[in-house]
Amino acid sequence: MFQDFFSLYIHIPFCKKKCNYCDFYSVTLNELENEFLNALKNEFSLRKKYLNKVKSIYIGGGSPSYLSEEGIEVLFDLIKDNVSLKEVEEITFEVNPESLTIEKVDILKYYNVNRVSIGLQSANSEELNFLGRVHSYQDFIEAYKMVYQNFLINIDLIYGLPNQSFQNVENSIYKVVSLIPHHISMYALEVNKNTPFFGKVEIDFDIQADMYIKIVDLLENYNYKQYEISNFSFKGLYKSYHNINYWKRGNYIGLGPSASSCVSNIRWRNVSDIYSYINSFNNGKIELDYIEELDFVDVMNEKLILLLRTRDGIEEGSDVYYYFKDELDKYYEKGYLEKKLGRYRFKKEYFFVSNNILSSMIKSKE
């Protein structure tokens, strides 16, 4: 009926405060923690048929570390009771520095979490304040000290803020790489609807594009190898297998409010409202924002877009290659793509603007 799963995503919607740029679904209603976890328990039961071949688990948000210690234990007991863990190779837990404690770290260790992603975003206090973060750089250092000996660590940074100098970006990167984390994610600031920044903050995409090239070169100099538009792993090791599955358009199941799932050519998203989520799942019902069936053209277009996000690109001889052969050859001749070891991929200087190019490559329906 469907292929084996690789990835399970669990969305924890709680945060101490909504950041100014964040368009992920989150709430500050942590008094609903117990009701949410009970609804999540029921969703696990309703989604049981999808959970027998999970190979990676990613717990994101929101801020999962904002759960209480008891809540984190309940969460992992739910996972243990519903997922066959013997085949799981990677368990990632997102943390914000201000909400991590040594007691929570001990719980993560006990439940065999092996990867932690820390949302730093900047080492500059003024930039952290602008972004609406509630932690300081020192908070981050204290959190890093708690986790660095026990987990593979990713650190998130944001660049391209209005009036941000590249010297500030370089300084944040230098402070991060001096800690030698296993993985770094670099995200250009975006301004989306339903965020405090919308209508108030303007992005200079030319400056972001220029910064991007410099960032890639800088991280390469520090031995962080790029393997996707925004992701860099130390010495080319420690890549996120969970995210690689997304970029290969593998199957994934999402639990929690607003969590998305994709099984073969069927995609859906859970309702993006915690009250509706709790009410529906605690009554044994599934409420969705949408569900859609993708046709062959949709699937192939998605494969093109996702694979060309990566440095591996598209392999000659693959189904995507044959379907888009004319387009790949066209943009190779134009100089946007390069061929390496039998694969088409974007040249480094066109990676940042690749969405504009991809919009001309995808195929419309007849």
Image (cartoon, rainbow, N blue to C red):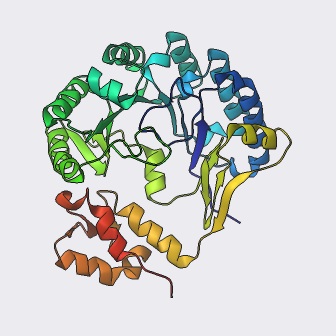
Task: Please indicate, yes or no, whether residue 313 appears anywhere in the rendered image.
Answer: no
Residue 187, image quadrant = top left
Q: Residue drawn at (60%, 51%), measured in percent from left and top?
A: 260
Between 34 and 234, the one lying in front of the other is 34
In this view, which residue lies farthest toward the bottom? 366
Residue 335, percent from left and from top: 16, 72
Residue 240 relative to residue 65: left or right: left
Residue 165 relative to residue 26: left or right: left
Q: Is residue 293 above or below residue 101?
A: below
Q: Is residue 20 above or below residue 8?
A: above
Residue 201, image quadrant = top left
Q: Residue drawn at (22%, 31%), measured in percent from left and top?
A: 173
Residue 213 relative to residue 132: left or right: left
Task: Please indicate, yes or no, whether residue 283 appears anywhere in the rendered image.
Answer: yes
Residue 10, percent from left and from top: 61, 39
Residue 325, image quadrant = bottom left
In this view, which residue lies farthest toward the right? 283
Q: Is residue 197 above or below residue 76?
A: below
Quarter holding the N terminus is bottom right
Residue 327, percent from left and from top: 31, 80
